[in-house]
Amino acid sequence: MTMHSDASLLNIRKIVTQAGYVIGVSSKEVLNNETATWGILTWRTGKLERVVVSTLGAETCSYWLGLKEMEWVMIILH
């Protein structure tokens, strides 16, 4: 299972920070840095509910939200 996240500080009218993540599964070839098929299980994008004052804070919040979702998905699938 793989999770990718990203965020952009104050990108909507300079007052809202946008963040998102995508969670998916792939074949084992990806572990060997080879091209592999990849399927999306879940994703989310939207404004952060928490106020952040730096790009690092925005990226960290986005990553944390993605990890929480990935943990939930792993519990459901196992």
Image: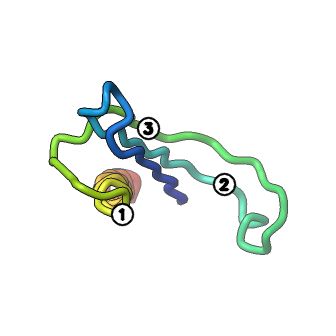
Residue extending farthest left: 50
Q: Is residue 72 visible?
A: no
Q: Which residue is mark 3?
A: 43
Question: Residue 59's spot in the image, x, y percent?
Answer: 38, 57
Asked if disc 2 and disc 1 are in contact, CB closer than 8 Å, the reply is: no
Q: CA distance from mark 3 to mark 2?
A: 15 Å
Which label was assigned to residue 71? none
**Observer-nearest of 61 and 24:** 61
> Taking 12 as reference, is 55 above or below it?
below
Q: Which residue is mark 1?
A: 56
Residue 16 figure quarter: top left
Residue extending farthest top: 13
Q: Secondary structure at mark 1?
A: helix
Which label was assigned to residue 26? 2
Q: CA distance from mark 3 to mark 1?
A: 21 Å
Q: Amino acid at mark 3?
A: Trp
Q: Secondary structure at mark 3?
A: strand
**Observer-nearest of 65 and 49:** 49
